[in-house]
Amino acid sequence: MTTLTVHHTLSSSDHERDAATLLAEASQLSKSAIKDAMLKGAVWLTRGKQHKRLRRATFTGQPGDTLSLYYDAALLRLAPPPAQLLADEKRYSVWIKAPGLLAQGTLQGDHCALLRLAEVQLKREVYLVHRLDREAAGLMLIAHDGKAAAAFSQLFASAKSDRLCKQYRVLVQGELHSAGDIALPLDGKAALTRYHPLQQDAALQATWLQIELVTGRKHQIRRHLAAIGHGVLGDPRYGSGNAHAAGLQLYATALRFTCPLTHQARHYQWEPVPGLNSTQDQANTSCL
């Protein structure tokens, strides 16, 4: 059995039986398979308007509760790529996300998502405030309480570059020798990407760029660079003739912002590609 979706609404005769047993009977899967799926985030509890993951196999519900299993055997077999904690600031943390790691989970599970790995490692509540493409690697910030999440969500949604600067390194097709802006609208909304050449790769006929993302549209960097004929190497979706054996060559390397909690300037940096000349002044960015 590869994929399976099961919904079981508890009756009055079910309310003293545990969730793992009920779902095993409803799905014809083994109880151990159900327990594994629960631990990996593939089981949900719906009670009224509340809809949340259920991980405790011994949970006993009440009549009217609905248990939902979204079983995907291939997904549940996956082992998550690593995530590295760069900074723990208590109310928020900054992580280095590996390529292939989701930002957050899906209905079918969250064991391969940064949000869940952070929750397990730090044993705190976790809140997603921005995203990074699954194929990309680099810095992500996670909030750990509701007020911090609201404040950082507002910060990341802001287009004011004096409050937040997000920088990336990308390896793109072809030669680029001059800095520039790409201001092509995406999905009917204004979008602005700034780029600055760092280094040529003659062997690949490619260029390393430093990118400043001023707005945050879906796949903005990848779509903008493909639109000007310089697709990101390794991008499976945008551009053509831009395959790369190591996958997507896009890295989130710097976060600079005025912290909405302390009102102090903060700077987090990660260097995934040693040897690139990429100081702030040379990149001519508007970062703090």
Image: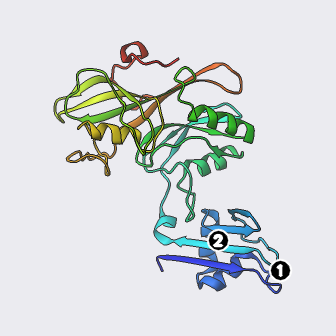
Give the left or right position of residue 144, taking residue 192 as reference.
right
Please tell me whether residue 233 is drawn above or below residue 60 in the rendered image.
above
Q: Position of residue 281 (x, y in %)?
A: 41, 12
State the separation of the CA atoms marked 2 and 1: 18 Å
Tell me how the rendering is colored: rainbow
- The residue at which mark 1 appears reads as 16
Determine the secondary structure under disc 1: loop
Q: Residue at x 34, y 38 (%)?
A: 224
Q: Residue type at mark 2: give it.
A: Lys
Residue 145 lies in quadrant: top right
The x and y percentages for residue 159 are 53, 29
- From the viewer's side, name the closer residue of 56 and 256: 256
Amino acid on which disc 1 is placed = Glu
Indicate the position of residue 4 as horizontal and vertical percent values.
53, 77
On the rendered structure, is 195 left or right of 125? left
Q: Are marks 2 and 1 in contact (CB under 8 Å)?
A: no
Q: Which residue is mark 2?
A: 35
Which mark is in front, 2 or 1?
1
Question: Splitting the image into 4 quarters, where does residue 17 fall?
Answer: bottom right
> With respect to residue 56, does 85 lie above or below?
above
Of residue 53 and residue 285, the one placed in the foreground of this image is: 285
- For marks 2 and 1 on the same chain, the one whose residue lies earlier in the sequence: 1
Q: Is residue 232 visible?
A: no
Q: Can you see residue 126? A: yes
> Image point 47% across, 61% down: which residue?
78
User: Residue 119 vs residue 162: left or right?
Assistant: right
